[in-house]
Amino acid sequence: MRLDLDILDTNIELEWSILNLLRKEDRWFSTEELAKQLNKTSSLILKAIASLRDNLEEFQSDQMALHVSKGKGVYLEIKSNNIDIGLFLIFLISNTSTYKLFYSIVTENFVSAKKFAFENFLSETTVRRHIKKVKEAIEPYELKLNRSTAVLSGRESQVRLFLNMVFWRLFAGKVWPFTNIDEHHLYFVTKRIAADTNIELTEVQEKQIMYFLAISAIRRRNNHYVSVEESWHELLDKNDSYLLFKDRVKPYTPITQQYPGEIAFLFFMTIIQSESKQTTPLLVSNFRFNRSKNTNLYQATEQFMEKFETEIVPVPHSQKRFFLLAAFSEHLFANLFHNFSTSISGNEFFPYTQHKLPMLKEKLYQLINDLYQETNNPIFLEEKFLAPRYALLLSLIAPLHVFEQRIKVRLDTDLSYIANKSIINQVKEYFTNNYNITFIDNSSTEQPDLILTNIPSQTPKGPAIVSIHRILAPRDFKLIRETLDQITEEKTRDQKLHNFS
């Protein structure tokens, strides 16, 4: 799930973008430089800088300060090595009118656009614009807002997951955003559930469970309950680990015991709450149950494994058990939820989603499409979720660029052999998951696709050339990436034309 800051406030999005640029380098930045990098006008940048400085002062941090000079520009002073800049973002978000509106919708304290506008010194037009943004954000997940009351509705399991992802992406356990829920009580409940079900949780995982329990409590207070869905029966009926789980958590979740869907949903969420070794015992017991019953979920996992090893890469025997369990967990998620594209915490697998990798993406989407055509299993309709998760599984056993066109790079500098080796290693490490790069020697008869040099020539034709510094700078990596993208596109286009002909 993508949660962009412009959904909450376009001004905050710009302030945060400026702050991220300033913190990357310990130097002064000119307004013109910031405007160019962020593709904004200088006047808009100046306005955002003034607002950013005011917000930092209000935040009252003793770990960073923003300095503005007419002659020098803007400089962010970082006074601590362990600063958590995310706390400032939380401060910004919590004070936006859009977030306040969203929280009032979640808790169902929203009465009307007119009342909210009056209480928050806004126009009704602004409030309705905010409501429209929220509606657009939830629509892909089959959720709706009631026209008059703005009550959030849809399949309750979808609502719970959406809210869980939003609050975790915004706050990540750093603060407790649920003002009407007792944090200490849920900490105790989480500890007891983990202890009595023999699950070891890290501090982060405990926070994730607490967020989930808080959201569930808010929804139940407003009479929204999870119902047992038809596809859940084969996953739960006569499942000993589920029956044991239900019995163990009974003392701490008395309300959920009255609603079978609630306890079942808690069970599923506990299994897939975090892809880690801590929850493996519960995952293993459920995998064994599904295998013994040859459930639809187990069949999907077996069918995937067979096709993955045939069409993508074989899975080493030493890693097959973990790979199989991880795939089972991903398929459980795809079986429970629809139209989500990220893991349960809302985090993307950036090495896949933020990079081109055209051949890999084509192969994975073809794999998923073939699986659906051959099995008619609705799990394989969730390709937006499954493709990056399959890429994550692939990364356990092979580089993501394994199917990409080979790009030959030659390094041509006036530096020593050792200095050149250092540059080669830095470039390889930086782009390891993105491009299938091979460095060729200057003596090689092969024609390079790209030349990296600190002494660029003026040759009008030939391979692409990127001028680099003797000590690689962030700008060098940016230029190299842009050029590699161009080369990848050209090679992919040429390959498709070749295949077509």
Image (cartoon, rainbow, N blue to C red):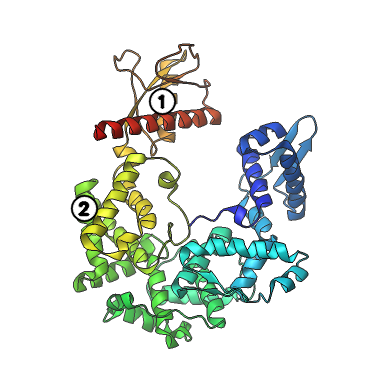
Give, as a three-letter code, the residue at label 1: Ile
Q: Quadrant of the C terminus?
A: top left
Left or right of 356 on screen, residue 286: left
From the viewer's side, name the closer residue of 208 and 203. Answer: 208
The crowd level at tag 2 (other Cα within 10 Å; few <14, some 14-19, many 20+) is some
Residue sitting at x 48%, y 81%: 225
| Residue of label 2 | 307
Q: Nearer the viewer, mark 1 or mark 2?
A: 2
Is 434 situated above or below 335?
Answer: above
Tell me the distance, in whole angstroms, between the alpha carbons under discs 1 and 2.
36 Å
Left or right of 68 on screen, residue 380: left
Is there any visible trace of residue 462 in the rendered image? yes
Is 269 situated above or below 1?
Answer: below
From the viewer's side, name the closer residue of 453 and 188. Answer: 453
Give, as a three-letter code, the residue at label 2: Lys
Residue sitting at x 42%, y 14%: 461
Left or right of 221 on screen, residue 426: left
Q: In the image, residue 148 lies at what x, y percent?
A: 63, 76
Q: In the image, residue 195 lies at what x, y percent?
A: 42, 74
Is there any visible trace of residue 30 in the rendered image? no
Left or right of 433 on screen, residue 477: right
Q: Confirm or deny contact between disc 1 and disc 2 (CB under 8 A).
A: no
Helix, strand or loop at label 2? It is: helix
Q: In the image, residue 74 lies at what x, y percent?
A: 73, 36
Q: Residue furthest front?
A: 501
| Residue of label 1 | 424
**In terms of image quadrants, where is residue 227?**
bottom left
The crowd level at tag 1 (other Cα within 10 Å; few <14, some 14-19, many 20+) is some
Helix, strand or loop at label 1? It is: helix
